[in-house]
Image: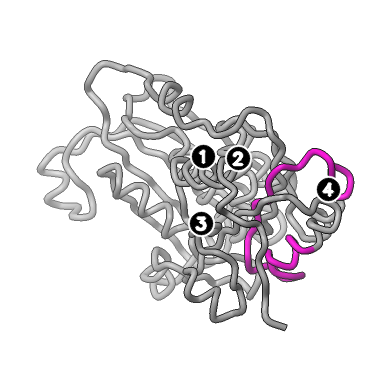
Amino acid sequence: MSKMLRQVIGEDIEFVWRPEAELYLVRMDPVQIDQIMVNLCHNAKSAIVGKGQITVATENADFDAAFCKMNVEYSEGKYVMLEVSDTGCGMTREILAQIFEPFFTTREVGQGTGLGLAAVEGIVKQNKGFVTVASEPGVGTTFKIYLPAYTGTAVDKQLERHQEMLPGSGETILLVEDEAALLPMVKMMLEKLGFRVLAANSVSAAVALAEKHKHEISLLISDVVMPEMNGCEVLEIVQKTNPDIKALFMSGHTAEVLVSRGFTGSNLNFLQKPFSINDLAEKIGKLIRSSEYPATAKTRQ
């Protein structure tokens, strides 16, 4: 995980990795843990201008009834704590009150969907955990994720479950996503599902990869709303060298919102963010095994 987080954070920011040696077990999809950490690290990176430090730490935590009575944001029990802290700009109380709202973002237009922290909270709640946040303007922010400790016998059925849902067998996918936190995350999901992935963080990079690998790419997976052009226009360009390519579009916006913006492709070729590896596997499986899902998508001029 540290290698993937290092890629998200970049080389200009100091990365400190402090894992606990003997952690409690947790019972959840490992990909969801990756999603949590990638989103939090990307959020931390965005808060730092110039030099700074991001620390990722894990430890065991035990909260009794007396402690929880005095600290109502905590829940009684044994937990594994995942912490991401940064020395960035910090947040005011007003911003803190909104950070988990879908589409809330303090970034400029085109710099993010505002879905990252909402996705983090959703995953944590799904797994019966909770989140605490401490922040001070000009000092930095600390997120702590608490996931319930699993006291049963450790049985790794994750690999078996992923093998059952693998839709890929080495096919090449062109992935286009301009949001830095999501590109490595989706790439990792696709590789776990058995695909070879050509990842592009911009339309120009995608076009170059499409030309270089035009006889290899079986599927285009693209964000819809991007600064240079939308995903439908990217598909039209890729189809010039690979007319039979199929496409799957993804967006934080609903299909209805995209239609209002000119996206008129089949909703069956659409995956709404945030999504799990299971959602991705199911959608791709249907798409690549059936001719009922056309690649074509049009936009209003």
Q: Residue at x 86, y 53 (%)?
A: 241
Q: Earlier in the sequence, mark 3 or mark 2?
A: 2
Q: Earlier in the sequence, mark 1 or mark 4?
A: 1
Q: Earlier in the sequence, mark 4 or mark 3?
A: 4
Q: Determine whether 67 is above or below 171 in the image.
A: below
* Circle on res. 31: none
Q: Earlier in the sequence, mark 4 or mark 2?
A: 2
Confirm or deny contact between disc 1 and disc 2 (CB under 8 A). Answer: yes
Residue 1 in sight: no
Question: Residue flagged by tag 2: what amino acid is it?
Answer: Leu
Confirm or deny contact between disc 4 and disc 3 (CB under 8 A). Answer: no
Q: Which residue is mark 2?
A: 5
Of circles 1 and 4, the one toward us is: 4
Report which quarter residue 73 is drawn in.
bottom left
Q: Is residue 125 magenta?
A: no
Q: Residue at x 44, y 61 (%)?
A: 135
231 left or right of 285 in image: right
Locate residue 181, reporting x and y percent.
60, 52
Q: Earlier in the sequence, mark 3 or mark 1?
A: 1
Report which quarter residue 66 is drawn in.
top left
Q: Which residue is mark 1?
A: 56
Look at the image and name its color scheme.
one colour
Q: Determine whether 159 is above or below 271 in the image.
A: above
Alpha carbons under labels 1 and 4: distance apart:
34 Å
Alpha carbons under labels 4 and 3: distance apart:
23 Å
Residue 195 in sight: yes
